[in-house]
Image (spheres, grey):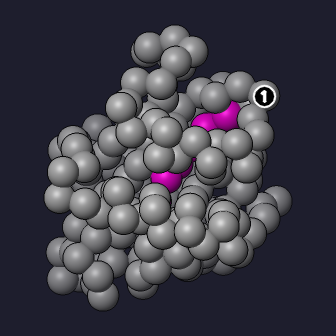
């Protein structure tokens, strides 16, 4: 159903990804919904790759930052790679269940930092946000995210692939 891999990357690579994504000059883009339009939620995103909109090439100057993560997953084809950034809203915000793509795909969720937010696959347990762990599952499973209350930011990298 799903797999969680702890200590997914070399610790130096993991630290480098965290440092770059938490840096003041990393570009985050506001989106006024998280899982579906008009859900009255928000987050910040950064797209590294979007095959549907931009073809088979990186769309971010920061793609090399996450290249070791992509190499470790070793996909046949990348569909979309984006970072999600949730801000601390002083209460737990639970987002709606969704799937990332309509087509068949796999999902890798890489947790950049540790916090009390989580991912939940529908009808299954909550997967905690633990730095340098990676959740792998088939994309047809509905899942949802939450915000956190113990850190300023919750950051993960969402990879949709074949």
Q: Is disc 1 surrounded by few (<14), some (14 to 19) or many (20+) residues within 10 Å?
A: few
Q: Residue furthest top?
A: 55
Q: In the image shown, does 31 or 123 lie closer to the viewer?
A: 31
Does the magenta run of residues contain 55? no
Q: How many marks?
A: 1
Does the magenta run of residues contain 159? yes
**Residue 14 x, y percent position in the rendering:** 54, 66
Q: In the image shown, does 109 or 56 lie closer to the viewer?
A: 56
Quadrant in the rendering for residue 6:
bottom right
Q: Residue at x 44, y 73 (%)?
A: 113
Quadrant in the rendering for residue 54:
top left
Q: Residue furthest bottom?
A: 150
Q: Residue at x 41, y 81 (%)?
A: 115
Q: Evaluate whether residue 1 shows in this view.
A: yes
Q: Residue at x 56, y 68 (%)?
A: 12
Q: Residue at x 56, y 62 (%)?
A: 13
**Residue 68 x, y percent position in the rendering:** 62, 48
Q: Main secondary structure of the magenta part?
A: strand
- Does residue 44 lie above or below 67 as drawn? below
- Does residue 55 lie above or below 129 as drawn? above
Quadrant in the rendering for residue 59:
top left
Q: Evaluate whether residue 105 shows in this view.
A: no
Q: Quadrant of the C terminus?
A: top right
Start-end of magenta stretch: 156-161
Q: Secondary structure at mark 1?
A: loop
Residue tagged 1: 76
């Amino acid at each position: 159903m799903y797999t969680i891999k702890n200590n997914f990357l070399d610790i130096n690579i993991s630290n480098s990804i965290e440092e770059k994504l938490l840096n003041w000059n990393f570009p985050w883009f506001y989106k006024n919904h998280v899982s579906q339009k008009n859900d009255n939620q928000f987050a910040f995103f950064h797209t590294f790759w979007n095959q549907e909109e931009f073809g088979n090439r990186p769309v971010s100057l920061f793609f090399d930052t996450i290249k070791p993560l992509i190499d470790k997953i070793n996909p046949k084809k990348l569909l979309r790679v984006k970072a999600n950034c949730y801000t601390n809203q002083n209460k737990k915000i639970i987002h709606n269940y969704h799937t990332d793509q309509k087509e068949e795909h796999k999902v890798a969720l890489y947790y950049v930092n540790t916090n009390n937010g989580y991912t939940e696959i529908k009808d299954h347990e909550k997967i905690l946000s633990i730095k340098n762990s990676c959740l792998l599952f088939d994309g047809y499973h509905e899942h949802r995210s939450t915000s956190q209350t113990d850190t300023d930011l919750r950051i993960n990298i969402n990879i949709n692939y074949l």
